[in-house]
Amino acid sequence: MRSTFGSPVLDAAARLLAPFMWLFAAYVVIHGHESPGGGFQAGVIVAASIILLRLVRGRLAASVLTSRDALTLACLGPLLYGGIGIASFFFGGNFLDYGVFPFPMEPSEVRAMGTLGIEIGVAVGVAGVLVLIFDALARWEDGTL
Amino acid sequence: MIRRLTVLLLAPALVVLLQAAADLPEVGDSTAPAFAHVAPYYLAHAHEETGAANYVTAVLADYRGYDTFGELTVIFTAGLACLLILGVCDKATPGRDGA
Amino acid sequence: MSLLAPGQLQYALAALLMLTGLYGMLAKTNLARKLMAMNVMQVAVIVFFIALAVRSGGSPPIEIEHAATQIEPAYANPLPHALMLTAIVVSVSTTGVALALLVRVHRRFRTLDESKLLDRLRE
């Protein structure tokens, strides 16, 4: 990306803001059972923080999460989701039937753990894909990823 | 010209849509058909069955987890399609489309 | 012809948004504006579904402790919320694909105007 909006104020603000956005995303995904939130929202928050860094710092921020890392994340999300779905086969359940996992908890708690796992998968996948789309659109001038 | 034609075309559509809206249940009516079938079941049993107090999460990730898996696949495919359409992966042949 | 009740104005809003988007898709000649109009149509659908989920006096569909009041709380319908949550994210990613296509078209033809595009295609 050629042009940036870089200025010392924006630079410091974005650097300060990004870790708190990640913290908030972690809260949103982990606390998604009890309060508004979930995987999609957390993924979008992570992607927004990365895109903020990209916008403010331009090429300097490319090392925060490279496009290849974003592609890896985008692949990892559906893999984690489907992996949890398939893992329940091995304990005698159906696809995505989290209740069969042998955790020493209440049955509903076990299901909540499975739900948390796939929410993390959704968050990782959505964050990776959104950063990937932004990079693909922002760097078409250079022709490189 | 084309704008007037479009407005002329869309005016009957507005009438039809508003007429259809007049037949819908009022907003906030808890006896509406949308509240009649699975929604009461979710509201009554979601917490004890899935352990999630957030009903939206319970529906999204547990009752309709297969659906959400499909959505995630759609998003993943869209990301891959973006990369392939813009051709950012093939460094060897930049500007292949003759731009 | 029956008139709209005051409780049905949200549906009228959704219909107006839908037709605004449809007008944009039909009358605008710039492809980027058509894409924005298509997004307005998606928002119309989302508004419509969320209006179906509203319960008057109901709380958001998150279970609250009601031991103190002893009144069974009424919740909004969680199903349309869950459906629209995924619809929003899918619309974001499809918009990304459409923008990528527009970038590609602009790279090839140097314009996004429909009539100019047709001229270039005939050449």
Image (tube, coloured by chain):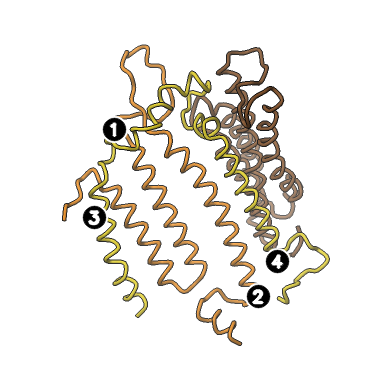
Element at badge 1? loop
Real-space Cα separation, disc 3 to disc 1, in angstroms: 22 Å
Residue shown at the point (64%, 68%) measured from the top left: C104
Q: Which residue is mark 4?
A: A141
Q: Colour of chain B?
A: yellow
What is the three-letter code of the residue carrying label 3?
A: Gln
Are the residues flagged by discs 2 and 1 from a single subunit? no
Q: Report the disc number at residue B19.
A: 3
What is the three-letter code of the residue carrying label 1?
A: Ser
Real-space Cα separation, disc 3 to disc 2, in angstroms: 45 Å
| Discs 4, 3 touching: Cβ within 8 Å | no
Q: What is the letter of the brown chain?
A: A
Mark 3 surroundings within 10 Å by alpha-carbon count, few (fewer than 14), some (14 through 19), many (20 or more): some
Element at badge 2? helix
What is the three-letter code of the residue carrying label 2?
A: Arg
Image vertical order of residue A75 relative to residue A145, above or below: above
Mark 1 surroundings within 10 Å by alpha-carbon count, few (fewer than 14), some (14 through 19), many (20 or more): many
Question: Disc 2 vs disc 4: which is toward the camera?
Answer: 2
Q: Is residue C36 among the parts visible in the rendering?
A: yes
The image quadrant where one finds the C terminus of chain B is: bottom right
Q: Residue furthest right?
A: B92
Q: Which residue is mark 2?
A: C108
Are the residues flagged by discs 3 and 2 from a single subunit? no
The image quadrant where one finds the N terminus of chain B is: bottom left
Q: Which residue is mark 1?
A: B30
| Discs 2, 4 touching: Cβ within 8 Å | no
Q: What is the letter of the orange chain?
A: C
Label 1: chain letter: B
Image x and y of residue C68, in percent: 35, 12
Real-space Cα separation, disc 2 to disc 1, in angstroms: 54 Å
Mark 3 vs 1, N-terminal side:
3
Image x and y of residue C78, in percent: 42, 33
